[in-house]
Image (tube, rainbow, N blue to C red):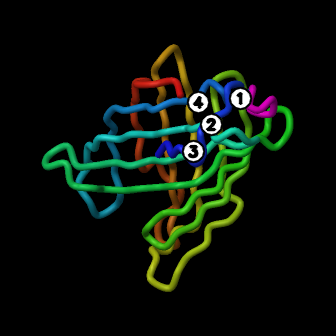
């Protein structure tokens, strides 16, 4: 995700202090479930990148542990929104946009969607909630999701190790 056009500044923007613990590339495995499907396991990589401004660029990709084929992808931005507050803006290739707001406390971020945009062919996602927590060089993240016919439920969770601290 790193590009020379957006080379990180020598020091991070002062507004990023509360979320600096997220910086870097994280990789590991996770598991999930969804009604009508078998429980599944997957590989995942998450990148939070300093681009020299008052937000972090975010990238996520996951793949099948069986054959390495792509499973999911997200791109977006994590934006500090005042002391103890964050905003997350994401695009999913499934035709979904996600706008979420929440809190940062210590090394934990919790956000809930305030808006989910859908294209005509997207699944009927109505709500997303995320929790990201870092201890030492281990990130645990969990996503809850709801659709028109499915109430909010735990969908995926992963344990990732820090590879770099960009």
Q: Residue at x 64, y 56 (%)?
A: 89
Label 2: state its secondary structure: strand
| Above/below status of 105 relative to 80 | above
| Earlier residue among tags 4 and 3 | 4
Q: Magenta segment, which residues?
A: 12-17
Density class for disc 1 (Cα within 10 Å; few <14, some 14-19, many ≥20) is: some
Q: Which label sits on residue 50?
A: 2
| Earlier residue among tags 1 and 2 | 1
Label 4 to label 1, Cα distance in Å?
Answer: 12 Å
Label 2 to label 3, Cα distance in Å?
Answer: 21 Å
| Earlier residue among tags 2 and 3 | 2
Q: Quadrant of residue 42?
A: top left
Density class for disc 4 (Cα within 10 Å; few <14, some 14-19, many ≥20) is: many
Label 3: state its secondary structure: strand
Tell whether 10 sits left or right of 163.
Answer: right
| Earlier residue among tags 1 and 3 | 1
Q: Residue at x 38, y 49 (%)?
A: 61
Label 1: state its secondary structure: loop
Label 1 to label 2, Cα distance in Å?
Answer: 7 Å
Q: Which residue is mark 4?
A: 22
Tell whether 134 sits left or right of 99.
Answer: left
Q: Which residue is mark 1?
A: 12
| Above/below status of 99 relative to 109 | below
Q: Which residue is mark 3?
A: 130
| Earlier residue among tags 4 and 1 | 1
Label 4 to label 3, Cα distance in Å?
Answer: 14 Å
Label 1 to label 3, Cα distance in Å?
Answer: 24 Å
Residue 143: x percent and y percent? 50, 46
Q: Which label sits on residue 79?
A: none
């Amino acid at each position: 995700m790193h590009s020379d056009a957006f080379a990180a500044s020598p020091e991070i923007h002062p507004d990023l202090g509360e979320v600096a613990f997220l910086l870097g590339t994280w990789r590991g495995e996770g598991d999930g479930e969804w009604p009508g499907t078998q429980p599944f396991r997957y590989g995942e990589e998450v990148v939070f990148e300093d681009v020299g401004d008052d937000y972090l660029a975010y990238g996520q990709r996951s793949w099948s542990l069986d054959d390495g084929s792509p499973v999911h992808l997200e791109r977006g931005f994590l934006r500090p929104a005042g002391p103890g507050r964050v905003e997350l803006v994401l695009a999913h290739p499934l035709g979904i946009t996600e706008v979420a707001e929440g809190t940062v406390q210590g090394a934990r971020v919790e956000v809930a969607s305030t808006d989910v945009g859908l294209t005509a062919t997207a699944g009927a996602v109505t709500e997303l909630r995320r929790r990201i927590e870092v201890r030492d060089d281990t990130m645990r993240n969990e996503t809850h999701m709801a659709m028109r016919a499915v109430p909010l439920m735990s969908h995926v969770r992963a344990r990732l190790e820090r590879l770099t601290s960009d």
